[in-house]
Image (cartoon, rainbow, N blue to C red):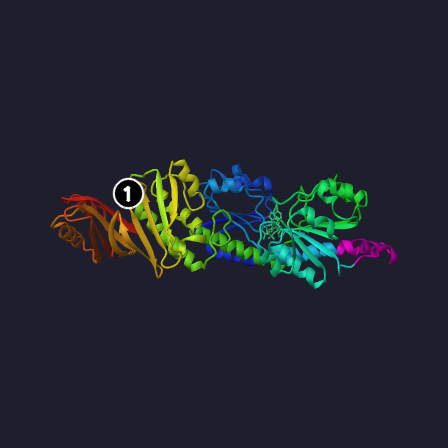
Amino acid sequence: MKPYKILVTEALGPEGLAFLRQHAEVDAYDLLPPEDLPGLMDGYDAVIIRSAHRLTRDIMAGHPRLKVVARAGAGVDNVDLDAATELGLAVINAPGANAIAAAEHTFGLMLAVMRNILLGDQHVREGGWNRQAYLGQELYGKRLGIIGLGRVGRNVARIAHGFRMTVTAYDPYLTDDIFRAHNVTRVTSLEALLPDIDILTIHTPKSGPKLGLDLLSRLPRGAVVINAARGGLIDEDALATLMESGHIQGAGLDVFSSEPPPKTLKLFQFPHVVMTPHLGGSTHEALAEVGVMTARGVIDALNGLTPPNIVNVPIPDIEHDQLHALDYAAQVAGRVFATLNPVPGHHLVLTLSGDIAGSVAPWMRQAVLAAVLQERVDDRVNTVNALIKAEEQGIRLLVEEDGADSGEPTLKLRWEGQPDTETVLTLRQGTPVFKVLAGIPMEIPWPERALITRHQDAPGVVGKVGTLVGQYDINIGDLHLGRTRQGDRALMVLTLDTSPPPALLNAIRALPGIQDVYVFEE
Ligand SMILES: NC(=O)c1ccc[n+]([C@@H]2O[C@H](COP(=O)([O-])OP(=O)(O)OC[C@H]3O[C@@H](n4cnc5c(N)ncnc54)[C@H](O)[C@@H]3O)[C@@H](O)[C@H]2O)c1
Ligand SMILES: O=C(O)CC[C@@H](O)C(=O)O
């Protein structure tokens, strides 16, 4: 029996489906009627959609088994990200997997408009041969303006250079280096871009700038407009008005405010508007790439790993193995800290140093916080929703970086004002090593199975615990002792070769001087 059940609501590349089927029972539809989705969500660990479905709060809430939702594509505008995050659902996408396809489709639309390819085709099919009527224009030497120089925008720039176009772009979120690296002239406003280009193409997310009558009118007379990004970025009524007046010569549209567009769409009247049904990412190659990237992300997320294509967690740009090791360290530190200090404070102080300071810190704080909260929140809590759950619990996280940004990654945790709760863990060659536990300095490479006693430092305690463990035929692999000072608070950490039964734990608890016993097992 496979451990997971996954619903795929729309055709996914066969390679992606095959990967999913290695790990999960998969119910895959070529196109699930969207109205059937709400009734089908129960019982799945993950749901993968493409373009025909929307994952709203109502649809995602109330399914205890659901852990991951995925958009097999670049944009995630058809997933309610805030709701998914609050619900602790990891959101996966496939950034860049169809960027080449979308960029090539952009040029398909551009050439179709500039060279009258569809009109010519129709003319020939109708028996015509009027070459003069379909005189076109070259791309060579034209001024291309790109809004959004991301994964698709950069591929568009690359292809444009092949046509010997001059390329200018507007993208306020990127550094100058990226424009230089792609040989693109940077402008810092739409007002600076629009008047000086012949062809405009937009490649932002749905949240990008909306081009209405005012902005589109700034294009020079005779300009061409392409939108293969998201419907609504170009106002369709404004475009129709400017097509009617001849201000805009032609347009290529792959996406629409409403898909499919209504029969009343004014743009249908204009022969120089070329339209395709959201085909930008629809190549065999892109679907294979999208399918595999989405499937891997979904399975990794279900396995508790942090895939690079998770949308609602601030993933650091580090190697997968390093991330995995840090994730484990965060889990261990948070779990042990929360167990040894069961009475929480209001301010959790987390100090990060070494390789986890800087860009790794935003993710690390969520990972640690999730591990701490998992010990005390009934609801689902994970790296996705840790900040929200902490707020609900009245816990504020104070993150400090101690200035050392190289060397062994080290996490220090304590409830503010309670030095006895301090826990320090270092990641040494991939192994978590505690250096302080509950305020007591100790050096403990973390084992797979540990038994910890909290006791009063007194003669005989160690021997009595050891004898009891032996009576249950359990081998002790390692033993560490620490205390604040002679006769005061003490901790003993035993590495056990097999699991201690409840009767043994009760017997240890009953020993004089023992305050508590905890077991940690992988
Ligand atoms: N038609 C299709 O089938 C198809 C296929 C792939 C991608 N897409 C869409 O194309 C668009 C681009 O995809 P991508 O993979 O390149 O995304 P991306 O995230 O890699 O790039 C988007 C770029 O837009 C920039 N941007 C964001 N807001 C902006 C603003 N207000 N002004 C200017 N720039 C802004 C970002 O800085 C980023 O560089 C998305 O909407 C995506 O959903 C459509
Ligand atoms: O092909 C698709 O289903 C989606 C393509 C596109 O909208 C994307 O966001 O990647």
Residue 396 located within the stretch drawn in magenta: no
Tell me if I can see residue 20 in this picture: no
Q: Quadrant of residue 109?
A: bottom right
Q: Residue at point 39% right, 42% down?
A: 397
- Residue 188 % position (x, y): 64, 49
Q: Residue furthest left?
A: 459
- Mark 1 lies on residue: 341
Q: Is residue 239 above or below residue 130?
A: above
| 10 Å crowding of disc 1: few (<14), some (14-19), many (20+) | some
Look at the image and tell me whether residue 109 can be seen.
yes
Q: Secondary structure at mark 1?
A: loop
The one of 176 and 133 positioned closer to us in this rendering = 176
Image: magenta residue range: 111-137
Is 135 contained in the magenta span? yes
Tell me: 522 left or right of 48: left
Question: 248 and 89: which one is in front?
Answer: 248
Foreground residue, 477 or 330?
A: 330
Where is residue 156 drawn, in percent x and y?
66, 57
Is 421 on the left-hand or right-hand side of 362? left
Q: Where does residue 18 sit, x and y in percent of width and height? A: 52, 58
* Kind of residue at badge 1: Asn
Q: Residue at x 55, y 59 (%)?
A: 15
Report which quarter residue 244 is drawn in: top right
